[in-house]
Image (spheres, rainbow, N blue to C red):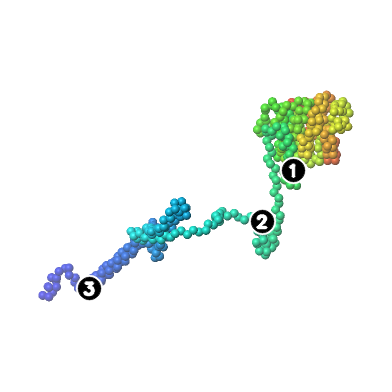
Amino acid sequence: MKKMRFEQLPQFIPSSLNSGRYLHNIITYLFIFGLGLVVGLTLSFYLNDLSFNIKENFEKEKYPVESIMANASIPNPPPPPPPPPPPPILPDRSSASQNTGVPPPPLIPQPQQTQVYNNPHQPNKPVEVAEQTTLPIEKPKLPLQQPKPLPEQMPLPVQHPKQVVEHIPLAIQEQAQQQMPFQEPKPLLNIPPKPPEAMHSMSDEELLHRAATMSHLEKSRIDYVPKVAFMYLSRGDLPLAPLWERFFAGNEGRYSIYVHTQPFYNGNAPPQSVFHNRRIPSKTVEWGKFSMIEAERRLLANALLDVTNQRFVLLSEACIPLYNFSTVYKYLIESTQTFVESYDDPSNVGRGRYNHRMQPHVTLRQWRKGSQWFEVDRELAVDIIRDVLYYNLFKRYCKPDCYSDEHYLPTMLTMKFWYKNANRTLTWVDWSKGGPHPTRFGRYEVNVDLLNHLRTGECLYNGKPTNVCHLFARKFTYLSLSRLLLYSQKALYY
């Protein structure tokens, strides 16, 4: 019967109530529940504190001044006292009593003034500051003084280098001198000014005066490259310009060009040419007349405006160079003499042209003749444009059949600078056929033999014999240009 009662028990009741498996599960569930509860509470407190800090930092960044003032423990300083009120304007007691005879009214003290300031701690409660007004006390007037400049505006004291060195200790000075010895500063070189333009608006008188006052350059003081001034006396275009451009090529900075033409000539060389814009203000020149001397002086005066020009060569439109530029440049720059042909010609074309009215300044024994084409240094060029005595003398008394261009410079330079003149010209001319004009050379006369013949000779250069006597030659026509360009490299070496 007991067995039947055990079998009739419900199915959901375990067979073994003392089993520990169910008890273990219950304890595990309770532990997990408690652990989750603890973690949840901890996270809730942490997240709450984090949100508060984030909000506080954001307010500090957005309102830094307010946050700093709110967190500061030091109270704000009291507001500054208000400025004193202006003194009352009182009438002059003495003047009032004298004019009206009534004594002035007594002075009434001003009541206390209260000024209201906003209190930053308590904005609804203003702060009252009471002021007591007193009578103004007159202070002695002091002389006005200029306000002192700010440190940024104060000028730096100018000290001599030696005064600056005196403030340095002696031991440091000796050590610095041992490491780097003292050297005297070199004087600054006076750089020559830019060469003036060939064309200008000066008159002949202004031009000569300005050129005569130009100072001479001293090689010991000024570092410069001396230049040779090539002065062309022409009617218009230079027919042999292509040959001269080949001669000047690659030598920029060592030469200057000046061209005197007839005033009615309006042409100009192309921009790439060395003769572009090198024409000077010109006047009419007539062959055999004194206007030839005026044109030469005009060329010299324009060339003297460039203080680097040291040698001056007068050429015609029919001249050609017989040597390359380097040879001509060295020959002229290193020469100790000038080259103006001057000799005594007893014939009718020499002494026969002398005018006795030139006495006593120029006598018959001093009368000289020579070639028009000259080469002089800067000293003689300045003296030529400064000359007044011989210039006026020849202008007045040397008239056709007296040609001033053949007698003026040879006579004057022989009288004044005979000691430095070579008495020969550097321009070769053929007068073998006679007549008033030299031989002309055209296309068929130009060949290598002729050019070699022009390059040979016997003369003295700086007191020593040489076979280089002529650097230029004339008279070559435009028809000879093609032959000259053909033989220039072979015979003239340029």
User: Type of residue at label 2?
Assistant: His
Spatial CA distance of label 3 from label 1 is: 131 Å
Q: Residue 362, position in %: x, y?
A: 85, 32
Q: Secondary structure at mark 3?
A: loop
The dot on residue 217 is 1
Q: Secondary structure at mark 1?
A: loop
Q: Local crowd at mark 3 within 10 Å, few (<14), some, or many (≥20)?
A: few
Q: Is residue 87 or residue 233 the one in the foreground?
A: 87
Residue 65 found in image quarter = bottom left
Q: Which residue is mark 3?
A: 19
Say if 149 sits above or below 251 in the image: below
Residue at the location (67% across, 29% down)? 268
Q: Is residue 342 or residue 203 the one in the foreground?
A: 203
Spatial CA distance of label 1 from label 2 is: 32 Å
The N terminus sits in image quarter: bottom left
Mark 3 or mark 1: which comes first in sequence? 3
Closer to viewer: mark 3 or mark 1: 1
Spatial CA distance of label 2 from label 3 is: 113 Å
Q: Residue 251, position in %: x, y?
A: 71, 39
**Relative to 33, is 365 on the left or the right?**
right
User: Type of residue at label 3?
Assistant: Ser
Mark 2 or mark 3: which comes first in sequence? 3
Q: Which residue is mark 2?
A: 160
The dot on residue 415 is none
Q: Residue furthest left?
A: 1
